[in-house]
Image (cartoon, helix red, strand yellow):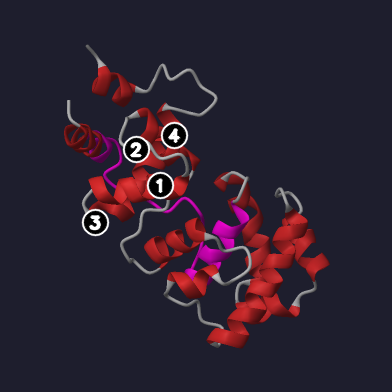
Amino acid sequence: MTKKQRAELVQIELDKLYPTTPIPLDHTDPYTLMVAVALSAQTTDKKVNQVTPDLFAVAGTPQRMAKLEEFQIKELIKEIGLSNTKAKNLKRMAELLLERHDGIVPQTYEELEALPGVGHKTASVVMSQGFGFPAFPVDTHIHRLMTLWKLTSGKNVVETEKDAKAIFPEEVWNKLHLQIIFYGREYSPARGKGEKDFITKMLFEK
């Protein structure tokens, strides 16, 4: 089976499993999405969704977030890992949104990645899920599964993203990256033994 054939089979099977792809992080607009994604680093989406209702109740806009002190933000997100750093980033992110963008989340990678706590993956999620631009955010699930399915030989998420964009049609990127994440969580968890991972078996069965 060629790489192209494997990619097509992956797409077909994921479309059967996940015809719809709800965004895992609860949010109401691009700003709250960006905050939620920034909080999700080294933490589960489930944990972020438990914390953000109280956070957004008092700081659901850059204007309101910027008015809080770091210790107040930290208190609201203390259950999440790296809460000290994330609280500092959220306050400065809000301040810079007000200083540079009139409180509006920008729609370019360059401007997004210039904000504290916003790396390329977070920017890609905001561009994709917040604004609908074609993007292929790569997390550890996607990197691991793309490697397992021999669709990339990338040594890191940057190289894997490049390979994913080359092999999959642009019009499916926004949906497909979520489908792969859902599949990884349900059928091929990083600490599991892969017994449920039928796509890998299907791709490489003799």
Of the numbered discs 4 and 3, the one sitting upstream in the chain is 4
Alpha carbon distance from label 3 to label 1: 17 Å
Q: For residue 180, what is the image quadrant?
A: top left
The relative height of residue 144 versus residue 168 in the rendered view (above or below) is above
What amino acid is at disc 1? Answer: Glu
Q: What stretch is highlighted in magenta?
A: 13-40
Q: What element carries label 3?
A: helix
What amino acid is at disc 2? Answer: Thr
Mark identifier at residue 159: 1
Q: Name the residue under label 3.
A: 170
The relative height of residue 26 versus residue 57 in the rendered view (above or below) is above
Alpha carbon distance from label 1 to label 2: 8 Å
Alpha carbon distance from label 4 to label 2: 10 Å
What amino acid is at disc 4? Answer: Arg
> How many numbered markers are drawn?
4
Of the numbered discs 1 and 2, the one sitting upstream in the chain is 2
Q: Does the magenta stretch include residue 38?
A: yes
> Which residue sits at x=23%, y=39%?
11
Question: Closer to the camera, 35 or 168?
Answer: 168
Q: Mark 2 points at which residue?
A: 152
